[in-house]
Image: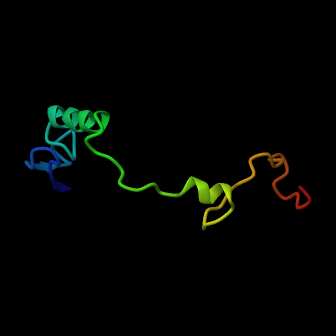
Amino acid sequence: MKHKCPICKAETDSAVHADFPFCSERCRERDLGNWASEKYVVSEPVFDEEDLAEGKGDAILLDLNNNLDNPNDTEH
């Protein structure tokens, strides 16, 4: 699979480059450093924690206290 390195924009190929999608270990480490220094950020939360606490929204909350030994038990 051919792609451009996200750091330096050099052509990369998954069949040739061990660090794919990066062209080199240097570019891979620069990308990791960008994440560590918060140069990259997720712009919006995936969900609003307040809405989850109030039971609003489309989130599905799983009760992890269920009896997992008998998953077909409909009474618990």
Q: Nearer the viewer, residue 40 or 30?
A: 40
Q: Which residue is drawn at 70% across and 54% down?
A: 62
Q: Which residue is drawn at 23% across and 39% down?
A: 31
Q: Which residue lies furthest to the right in this view?
A: 75
Name the quarter where the C terminus is drawn: bottom right
Q: Nearer the viewer, residue 17 or 23?
A: 23
Res 56 quadrant in image: bottom right
Q: Where does residue 41 sit, x and y in percent of width and height? A: 33, 47
Task: Give the left or right position of residue 73, taking residue 22 as reference.
Answer: right
Q: Nearer the viewer, residue 26 or 48?
A: 48
Res 34 quadrant in image: top left
Rendered position, 45 above or below 28: below
Q: Which of 55 and 15 is in front in this view?
A: 55
Q: Which residue is drawn at 61% across and 66% down?
A: 57
Q: Where does residue 5 sit, x and y in percent of width and height? A: 15, 48
Res 38 quadrant in image: top left
